[in-house]
Amino acid sequence: MTETATSFATATTAWHPRDGAAPNAQRLLHGSGLTLVRISFRQGQILDEHRAPGPILVHGVSGTVDLEVTTDAGIETHHLVPGTVLHIAAGDPHRLTAREDAVVHVVLHRNVASTG
């Protein structure tokens, strides 16, 4: 097996749900400045409101998820379907609710200097 310094992940779109009210979040990749997380939802599961310390990208992989983001302008609701990508600024509260079984990817950016 060849050693590599490059991080990589496989089978990232697989659905790995869990029972209960909350979805299953799994860290798939962790590299310099970035983390990739797969969140597998069963229909109706909710990832309660929370904040990320840095900016994030949320990418719809399968199914449909409603994503509410609270910004200075108010609450925005976005419907994530496969292929949809949403940027959320650092510190903006957000909440995800699965309308059907779904998978989303979240890319968390760490150690990002504020430009504001």
Image: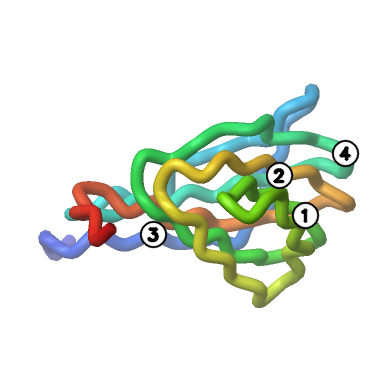
Residue in view at x 44 percent, y 41 percent: 91
Indicate the position of residue 82 as horizontal and vertical percent values. 71, 72
The mark nearer the N terminus, 1 or 3, is 3
Looking at the rendered structure, the kind of residue marked 4 is: Gly
Between 114 and 19, the residue placed more toward the observer is 114
Residue receiving disc 1: 65
Mark 3 vs mark 4, CA separation in Å: 28 Å
Residue in view at x 66 percent, y 76 percent: 83
Mark 2 vs mark 4, CA separation in Å: 10 Å
Badge nearest the viewer, 3 or 2: 2
Looking at the rendered structure, the kind of residue marked 2 is: Leu
Q: Are marks 4 and 1 in contact (CB under 8 Å)?
A: no
The mark nearer the N terminus, 3 or 4, is 3
For this view, does 108 lie left or right of residue 44?
left
Residue receiving disc 4: 44
**Mark 2 residue element:** strand
Characterize the local packing of mark 1: few (<14), some (14-19) or many (20 or more) Cα atoms within 10 angstroms.
Answer: many
State whether residue 51 is above or below residue 114.
Answer: above
For this view, does 9 lie left or right of residue 98?
left
Q: Are marks 2 and 1 in contact (CB under 8 Å)?
A: yes
Residue receiving disc 3: 9
**Mark 1 residue element:** strand
Mark 2 vs mark 1, CA separation in Å: 6 Å
Looking at the rendered structure, the kind of residue marked 3 is: Ala
For the C terminus, the quadrant is bottom left
Residue receiving disc 2: 96
Between 103 and 12, the residue placed more toward the observer is 103
Indicate the position of residue 64 as horizontal and vertical percent values. 81, 60
Characterize the local packing of mark 2: few (<14), some (14-19) or many (20 or more) Cα atoms within 10 angstroms.
Answer: many
Mark 3 vs mark 2, CA separation in Å: 24 Å
Looking at the rendered structure, the kind of residue marked 1 is: Val
For the N terminus, the quadrant is bottom left
